[in-house]
């Protein structure tokens, strides 16, 4: 099972505050532990929403909305992608993480859909296309 582990933004992360040397070291050590355990697939921090954009879809219409966005606590400041056996295991790994923000911080854990989750609508042709795409991406890494 794969889980996207999202660090919720705070007013500090949205202001562009950089982590301390101590936090960078602690996160590096934690990420190395995840790698050694075979759990970590990806991990990245995100720039503040002021440097981003949203694209709003409404039928055929596309509207671009430039950041910053309101409600920092609803935004994502960074993420990990874990591969573990269960939600409980993902939770246990997250509980071992250093607090990524000074003070209160939320980390959300969401399971990633797998091919089998889509049922019959995910046709053999769509599965083959997905496999070709994943192979091409893997070959570039």
Image (spheres, rainbow, N blue to C red):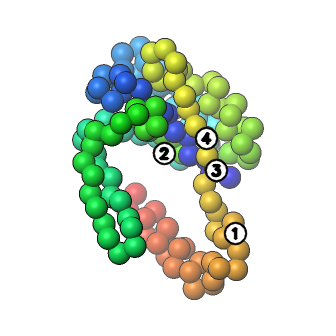
* Rendered image: mark on residue 64: none
Marks 2/4: CA–CA distance: 14 Å
Mark 2 vs mark 3, foreground winner is: 3
Q: Is the residue marked by circle 4 packed among few (<14), some (14-19), or many (20+) residues within 10 Å? A: some
For mark 2, give the secondary structure. strand
Looking at the image, is mark 2 or mark 4 earlier in the sequence? 2
Q: What residue sits right under mark 3 in the picture? A: 111
Quarter of the figure that contains the C terminus: bottom left
Residue 44: % across, % down: 41, 39
Q: Is the residue marked by circle 3 packed among few (<14), some (14-19), or many (20+) residues within 10 Å? A: some
Marks 2/1: CA–CA distance: 22 Å
Looking at the image, is mark 2 or mark 1 earlier in the sequence? 2
Looking at the image, is mark 1 or mark 4 earlier in the sequence? 4
Residue 75: % across, % down: 43, 38
* Rendered image: mark on residue 42: 2
* Rendered image: mark on residue 116: 1
Q: Residue at x 36, y 36 (%)?
A: 70
Q: Residue at x 49, y 34 (%)?
A: 7
Looking at the image, is mark 1 or mark 3 earlier in the sequence? 3
């Amino acid at each position: 099972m794969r889980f996207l582990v999202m660090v919720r933004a705070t007013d500090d992360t949205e202001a562009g505050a950089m982590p301390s040397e101590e936090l960078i070291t602690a996160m590096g050590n934690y990420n190395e532990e995840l790698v050694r355990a075979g759990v970590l697939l990806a991990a990245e921090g995100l720039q503040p929403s002021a440097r981003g954009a949203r694209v709003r879809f409404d039928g055929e219409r596309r509207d671009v909305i430039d950041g910053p966005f309101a409600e920092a606590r609803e935004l994502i400041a960074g993420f990990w992608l874990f591969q573990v056996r269960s939600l409980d295991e993902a939770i246990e790994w997250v509980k071992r993480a250093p607090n990524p923000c000074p003070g209160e911080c939320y980390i959300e854990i969401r399971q990633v859909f797998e091919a089998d989750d889509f049922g019959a609508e995910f046709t053999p042709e769509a599965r083959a296309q997905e496999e070709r795409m994943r192979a091409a991406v893997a070959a570039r890494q």
